[in-house]
Image (cartoon, grey):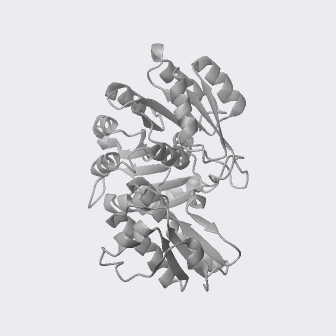
Amino acid sequence: MTPKILSVDDSKMIHMVIGKAFKPYDVQLFYATNGVEGLAVATRENPNLIILDVTMPVMDGVETLTKLKSDPLLKDIPVIMLTAEAGRENVVKIARIGVRDYMIKPFKEEALIEKAGRIVDLQAKGSGSGKAKSITDPATILVVDDKQAIIQQVQEAIAEYPWTVIGTAQCGEAIDISSRENPDAVLVSLSLPDRAAFNFFQMIRANPKTKSIPVFGMCIKTALEEQAQAQSIGFTGIITKPIDPSDLNFRLTKAMSLDTSAKYFKMDGPTLMISRMPNSISDIIANEINSHIKPKTQEMVESGVAKMIIDMTELTKIEMGTIKLMLTIMQNCVDLSIKYRVAGSPEFIAQAKTFAETKDLVIYASREAAKEGF
């Protein structure tokens, strides 16, 4: 998938400059005129980079940055701040909050591209990157850790994907592997001796061949100093140990700009779409699924597919968030004249009757039962 870049600025002129700067590159640009709009677009689109002005009406850039960094789903999005010459005093403040870089206005387009290119992989239009585009594509994940158990945890966490994990305990060897294999993402332990992880990161970023690879630091939750250092020099994000598989998958697929819709939406024959809900739906997973609903239902209609089964059979426990997600899918189907049926486990059917929104909903006992006569 192409990188998504969000510009948040109340100046139409700045939006025009940014649009012109990125025109030669294969990126998706989104625009917002203040912090409130910017947060809404960031939540909906999950951009790979935000270019954020300091001085704006409604909600200024500093407050917007603070809210971004306090949101678990948005905090890892890199931010380049724009500030006027007179706003230099803001630089120290925004650096403490967690900005990736900043620029003084007015700026040259070339300088913006140079800074953005350190963060996202900017490919000229039509060139193609050769990298994985979807979770169904092969990819290589490099794990640098002197604990074999951590490498094993990563392998188990991403076992559902056709991805290869290369593990090493030595940063020197990791540099050679990165140059040779050009991995899709790197996970490196911040607790390696002699600040090896930080030196490794700087070498990765200094090499034109590897400078755009997402690099995550790994550490225990209480290693706050190491986390702050990693964020200050530009690590893509932090993965805390013990590793949460859902969190790791979400962060990797987002950093690699992969289409994850295949996990939740799959064709069953030429005329039927299956929307499959996993057995556990965290806030992260719900947000991911929600981002795919509208484009997938629109894609269905454009392709002549007019039937969907919402498969909840793997769920044994439901909460209001799950119900809202299901209702969103149903409403999109109604809006686009897509016929739908819901299938659920016995536990799901029983619990659905306790919610006012679904107590009268017809739920089939299996996916096969939902297909009959559909």
Q: Is residue 89 left or right of residue 137?
A: left
Where's residue 264, x and y in %? 55, 62
- Seen from the viewer's position, the closer of residues 278 and 306 is 278
In this view, 203 is above or below 348:
above
Toward which corner of the image does residue 269 lie, by quadrant? Answer: bottom right
From where the camera sits, is residue 325 visible? no
Which residue occupies 35% across, 69% down? 351
**Which residue sits furthest top?**
194
Q: Nearer the viewer, residue 191 or 198?
A: 191
The quarter in which the C terminus is drawn is bottom right
Residue 326 location, quadrant = bottom left
Where's residue 27, x and y in %?
Answer: 59, 55
Looking at the rendered image, the quarter that the N terminus falls into is bottom right
Query: Residue at coordinates 55% horizontally, 48% vertically from top-left?
Result: 253
Task: Indicate the quadrant where residue 283 lies.
Answer: bottom left
The number of numbered discs placed on residues in the rendered structure image is 0
Q: Residue at (42%, 45%) from the top-left corner?
A: 79
